[in-house]
């Protein structure tokens, strides 16, 4: 699998570091990691180009993860960009909502690096 | 009665074990630690240095509170990050807040039928112990205590009708 640039979106800086570590433990070769603390910052990061994968929380201030997904749909540079949600909002309704607005996967917190691997690798292989 | 009506009615006999389980899972999965049950003396050492609060709104309304000592907060942060944390800073507040957030989310996901009708707030972290918290809960309180590397972690859920 080629090296990728991952964008990690979470209002917790500790959680962003945990997600990055989980990606590396899952064997995903990261050329670059970008961070954003809300959906608006994430949109800016995507618009800079070069992002191969987004891992995104849902509950965040300023712009939440669902609104980010909705707005991402109109970003030309983001066509086909895989987004995997990582969130405490793990009920069925949230999963369905996220998938309906473009998420490719859904990981519930708390999570293991094995779960990250199981959900992210197939998404990368398809993209 | 809808499933949501059932879940919004607190039942200490069934909810306390679920809350205990939610706490244990977060510490095991995210920190790699097995929490221990309280020993005979831990009730005498109520932690008050760090308090993390997460609000719940919707069919289940209330406040989840996690309390721990300063040393426990720093140890939590170190275990989450995989590096030593030498001082109290924003990262420690962030880590303790995120643990409470995951406990709240994990607990609510264990209540069947609650669905998307309960939302979590972003966490608030209070440092220091010289305060009183008045949650105005009128439907009961559930509290569980565990030992994290020998220090008590107290998680309580105050429920509003």
Image (spheres, coloured by chain):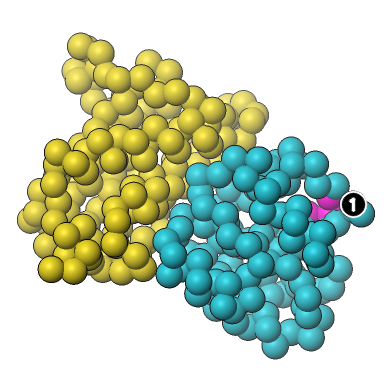
Chain colours: A cyan, B yellow
Direction from residue B121 to residue A55 in the image, left or right: right
Residue at the extreme right of the image, as rendered: A2
> Is residue B136 magenta-colored?
no
- Give above or below for A76 relative to B77: below
- In percent of the image, x 10 and y 48: which residue is there? B140
Classify mark 1: helix, strand or loop: loop
Tell me which segment is drawn in magenta.
A30-34
Disc 1 target residue: A1
Q: How many marks?
A: 1
Name the chief secondary structure element in magenta. Answer: strand
Q: Indicate the position of residue B106 as horizontal and vertical percent values.
A: 39, 48
- In percent of the image, x 62 and y 26: which residue is there? B84
State which quarter of the image contains the N terminus of chain B: bottom left
> Is residue A31 magenta-colored?
yes
The quadrant where residue B83 appears = top right
- In percent of the image, x 58 and y 67: which residue is there? A38
- Give above or below for A70 relative to A18: below
- Give above or below for A87 relative to B66: below
Q: Indicate the position of residue B81 as horizontal and vertical percent values.
A: 61, 35
Q: Indicate the position of residue A88 as horizontal and vertical percent values.
A: 46, 55
Residue at the extreme top of the image, as rendered: B40
């Amino acid at each position: 699998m080629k090296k990728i640039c991952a964008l990690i979106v979470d209002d917790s800086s500790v959680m962003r570091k945990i997600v990055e570590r989980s990606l590396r433990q899952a064997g995903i070769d990261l050329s670059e990691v970008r961070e954003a603390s809300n959906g608006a910052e994430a949109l800016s990061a995507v618009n800079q180009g070069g992002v191969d994968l987004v891992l995104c929380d849902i509950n965040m201030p300023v712009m939440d993860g669902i609104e980010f997904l909705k707005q991402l749909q109109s970003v030309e540079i983001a066509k086909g960009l895989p987004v995997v949600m990582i969130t405490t909002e793990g009920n069925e309704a949230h999963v369905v909502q996220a998938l309906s607005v473009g998420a490719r996967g859904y990981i519930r917190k708390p999570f293991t690096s094995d779960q990250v691997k199981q959900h992210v690798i197939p998404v990368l292989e398809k993209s | 009665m809808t499933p949501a009506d059932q879940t919004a009615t607190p039942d200490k006999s069934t909810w306390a074990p679920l809350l205990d389980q939610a706490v244990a899972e977060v510490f095991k999965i995210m920190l790699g630690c097995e929490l221990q049950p309280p020993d005979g003396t831990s009730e005498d050492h109520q932690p008050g240095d760090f308090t993390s609060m997460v609000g719940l709104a919707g069919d289940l309304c209330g406040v989840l509170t996690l309390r721990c000592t300063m040393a426990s907060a720093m140890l939590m942060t170190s275990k989450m990050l995989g590096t030593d944390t030498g001082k109290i800073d924003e990262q420690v507040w962030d880590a303790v807040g995120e643990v409470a957030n995951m406990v709240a989310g994990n607990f609510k996901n264990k209540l069947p039928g609650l669905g998307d009708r309960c939302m979590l707030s972003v966490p608030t972290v209070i440092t220091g112990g010289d305060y009183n918290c008045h949650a105005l809960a009128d439907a009961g309180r559930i509290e569980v205590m565990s030992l994290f590397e020998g220090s008590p972690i107290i998680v309580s859920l105050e429920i509003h009708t």
